[in-house]
């Protein structure tokens, strides 16, 4: 029996197609709730000789946005898709977060959060903070592309693919110390992230951790040494007792310490310190703060978790106490197997997905719908004296929003950005 396999392009296929099993069920017209075993037992999947499989790759039309050549889908968040791209000038791999104005309007604070993220990321430069490389706007299509440093994935994905949904201690220590490094930088600049969790901690190919997702972050007033915040939109399981109990104001620094403590708890145990069937029950449990740490978590890690998850924010550890804590400072030799990056659509090596599009373009494709006008911003990172201060636009002023008035500095015609 000869069998053909087609490679799908997520541009033309619905996003559910990313799940291989769904693809086959769809093609074979099998009920969605059937398991693979159901299919086998009814003889729908016949065995076949792998040598007889013929792979027929579907053509991948090459699409460019500004100087960036688009690759495959990397992931999808509530704000939009994230695709791999290649900078055709520098040949650096990046990730493009694709945002549609229509979709943002449907998300509470959607547009405001995105603009907040752009404004904050423009001011930040640190090894452990995701870098915003460029912003491109297509006014006609009402689309915005945030070009970010390329990462292979997030800690959440890795946890989901690891035995017991946790990391060995030495691996958790590596990620946690990088998180604290990044957080120290953010706090020194008066920025409270407010949504620290494994899903917002990405890794590059060389295992450098990048704090990402600054949509709900807040830049504190430089005249407020206490770092008082009055709002939080972070993920419920990572919220501290003061927020769960409905306080009007709280120390922003201590929110990030708490959520980093929940993150560490999650990395080493595979569980959450507080759970609930719904947000109300969850907040009730967090508010009471009766913390149970599994018995396999021994000292000194135990006391670090207890210190970071203190109910009273004033008694909660500071970054300084964390950085001098015995578990933080001691070396953790690699004693067990590393939890690897999960594969991207079967590819453990995370090879560049842009290449097939480029091969296709250079072999046969004729210029297509690419001649659109984009407004691009190449962010200026090397500022004099290492200064990273950039005036933060008022995100509430509609006239300053990129949809209306570009915050960008140069305009490029798509046609001029085609690869030679
Ligand atoms: N810089 C990046 N490099 C590689 N992949 C990325 C990058 N940024 C995001 N991704 C991938 O895209 C997915 C969606 O990211 P995004 O930041 O839009 O949403 P999220 O934080 O996962 O979810 P939400 O926005 O709903 O909180 C991530 O889970 C990750 O797999």
Image (cartoon, rainbow, N blue to C red):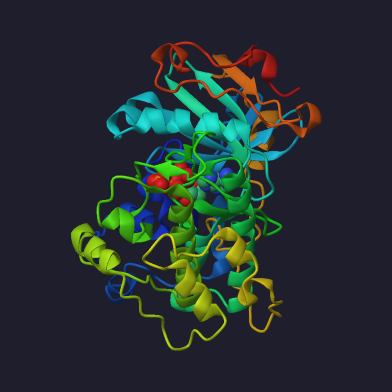
Residue 250: percent from left, percent from top: 37, 49
- In terms of depth relative to the viewer, which is nearer, 276 or 361? 276
Of 220 and 12, which appears nearest the observer? 220
Instruction: Write the residue at 35% across / 41% down.
Output: 230
User: Which of 291/412 is in front?
Assistant: 291
In the picture, the quarter occupied by the C terminus is top right
In the image: residue 144, left or right of residue 134 = left
Work out whether 67 lies above or below 34. Answer: above
Where in the figure is residue 381, as x and y percent of width and height? 72, 30
Up the image or down, 206 lies above or below 35; here it is above
In this view of the protein, can residue 10 be seen by the observer?
A: no
Position in image of residue 32 (x %, y %): 25, 59
Q: Quadrant of residue 262?
A: bottom left
* Residue at 46% across, 21% down: 394
Q: Is residue 87 left or right of residue 276?
A: right
Picture coordinates of residue 371, whole percent (x, y): 57, 14
Q: Quadrant of residue 335?
A: bottom right
């Amino acid at each position: 029996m000869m069998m053909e396999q087609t490679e799908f392009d997520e541009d033309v296929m619905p996003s559910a197609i990313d799940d291989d099993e769904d693809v086959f069920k769809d093609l074979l017209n099998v009920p969605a709730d059937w398991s693979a075993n159901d299919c086998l037992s009814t003889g729908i999947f016949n065995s076949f000789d792998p040598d007889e499989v013929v792979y027929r790759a579907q053509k991948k039309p090459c699409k460019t946005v500004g100087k960036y050549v688009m690759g495959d889908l990397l992931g999808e968040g509530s704000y939009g898709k994230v695709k791999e791209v290649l900078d055709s000038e520098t040949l650096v791999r990046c990730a493009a977060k694709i945002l549609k104005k229509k979709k943002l309007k449907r998300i509470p604070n959607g547009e405001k959060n995105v603009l907040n993220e752009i404004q904050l990321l423009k001011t930040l430069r640190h090894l452990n903070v995701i870098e915003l490389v460029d912003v491109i706007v297509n006014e006609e299509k009402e689309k915005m592309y945030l070009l970010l440093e390329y990462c292979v994935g997030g800690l959440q994905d890795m946890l989901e693919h690891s035995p017991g949904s946790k990391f060995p201690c030495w691996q958790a220590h590596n990620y946690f110390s990088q998180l604290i490094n990044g957080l120290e930088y953010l706090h020194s600049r008066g920025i409270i992230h407010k949504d620290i969790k494994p899903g917002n901690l990405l890794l590059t190919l060389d295992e450098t951790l990048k704090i990402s997702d600054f949509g709900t972050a807040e830049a504190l007033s430089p005249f407020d040494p206490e770092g008082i915040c009055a709002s939080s939109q972070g993920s419920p399981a990572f919220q501290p007792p003061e927020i769960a109990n409905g306080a009007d104001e709280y120390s922003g620094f201590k929110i990030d310490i708490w959520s980093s403590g929940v993150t560490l708890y999650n990395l080493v145990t595979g569980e959450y310190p507080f759970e609930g069937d719904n947000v109300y029950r969850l907040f009730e449990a967090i508010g009471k703060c009766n913390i149970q740490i599994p018995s396999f978590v021994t000292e000194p890690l135990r006391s670090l978790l207890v210190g970071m998850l203190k109910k009273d924010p004033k008694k909660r550890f500071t970054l300084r106490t964390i950085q001098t804590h015995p578990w933080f400072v001691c070396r953790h030799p690699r004693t067990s197997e590393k939890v690897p990056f999960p594969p991207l659509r079967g590819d453990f090596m995370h090879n560049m997905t842009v290449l097939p599009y480029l091969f296709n373009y250079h072999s046969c494709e004729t210029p297509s719908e690419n001649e659109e006008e984009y407004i691009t911003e190449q962010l200026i990172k090397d500022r004099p004296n290492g200064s990273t201060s950039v005036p933060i636009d008022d995100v509430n002023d509609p006239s300053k929003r990129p949809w209306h008035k570009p915050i960008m500095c140069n305009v490029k015609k798509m046609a001029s950005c085609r690869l030679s």
